[in-house]
Image: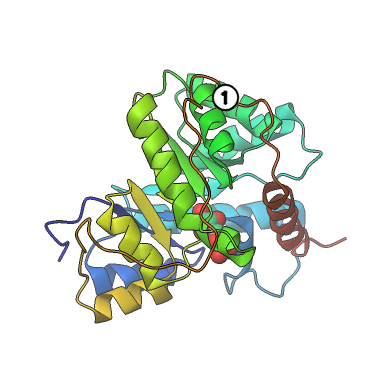
Amino acid sequence: MKPRNLHTKIFLDSGIPTETQEMLQLLTFLDGQTTNPSLMAKNPVLSGKKFSKSELYDTYQKIATEISGLLPQGSVSLEVYADKDTSYEVMLEEGRKLNQWIPNAHIKLPITKVGLQVARTLVDEGVNVNMTLCFTQDQAAAVYQATTGAKRGQVYVSPFIGRLEDIGFSGMSLVFNIEQMYREEGDGHVMILAASIRSLEHLMLCLSRNIDIITAGSGVYKRWADQGCIVPDATYQHISDREAIPYTKDLLQNPSVDIQHNLTDTGLQRFADDWNNLLTL
Ligand code: E4P
């Protein structure tokens, strides 16, 4: 049963519908699901095989439809294929296409110059977006600025905790900085979706601070369920040996024009490589 004191939405991070069923059984609820090209490529229907472009998109659509059908009240994030050279027109067309597949999509776009321009257009068309590969407070401020006027729930920003931890920084400190910035300076139209969760501690910290949404793999939720799905209170602490990222004040009013981050660039390339590996030459 959903814990009464749970104020964070719980999403599964997976491209495999049987995992959705398994988590629905284990937790008895799920508020949504996030996918990305690498997670999709791990689906047994795709993994290790080769497809033409149209076959690959047909299979992607079938998987998305299956997940969406399991979570009719939830949100399902579908990521556009993109690399550093993808144009505004191509990304926009792909975003519109994915959005037609299911009624409850959030279209995942990278936080790049083109990704932000596409977000502006899609939001104006009433499409939901999930701005992914977020590694800095500046990027989160840029997402906010690019999507002003959106309804709450229409825009997610996904800070990647685990990938920051991999290079020695506290991913949780970025999540807390974005939360503080939106709370103190924003109008609430962007929701934080804490992603790249690698441990139960990340989950617990997000729950204890009522972060809007968390997405994690089934392994983390199994450990949470083993502990009775407890929701710690705001005093919950976890001592991290990673370097805390300092908070920047007044960023929403004075956003930086430089939103480039190496992890965004390499992350985009990794997603593109995993997707391209499924294609026949
Ligand atoms: C979800 O939206 C993200 O794509 C996912 O959490 C990334 O996780 P990873 O850093 O473990 O690949």
- Vertical placement of residue 183 versus 187, above or below: below
Residue 261, given in percent of the width and then of the height, sits at: 69, 44
Ligand 1 image position (quadrant): bottom right
Query: Residue lying furthest right in this view?
Result: 281
Residue placed farthest to the left in the image?
4
Give x and y (percent) for residue 198.
Answer: 48, 69
**Figure check: 259 above or below 272:** above
Amino acid type, callout 1: Pro
The answer to whether residue 215 shows anywhere in this view is yes
Residue 104 in sight: no
Q: Nearer the viewer, residue 73 or 88?
A: 88
Q: Disc 1 marks which residue?
A: 255
Whole-percent x and y of residue 122? 54, 26
Image quadrant holding the C terminus, namely: bottom right
The crowd level at tag 1 (other Cα within 10 Å; few <14, some 14-19, many 20+) is: some
**Where, quadrant-wise, is the N terminus in this rendering?**
bottom left
Q: Residue at x 19, y 56 (%)?
A: 6
Seen at 41% across and 23% down, the residue is 150
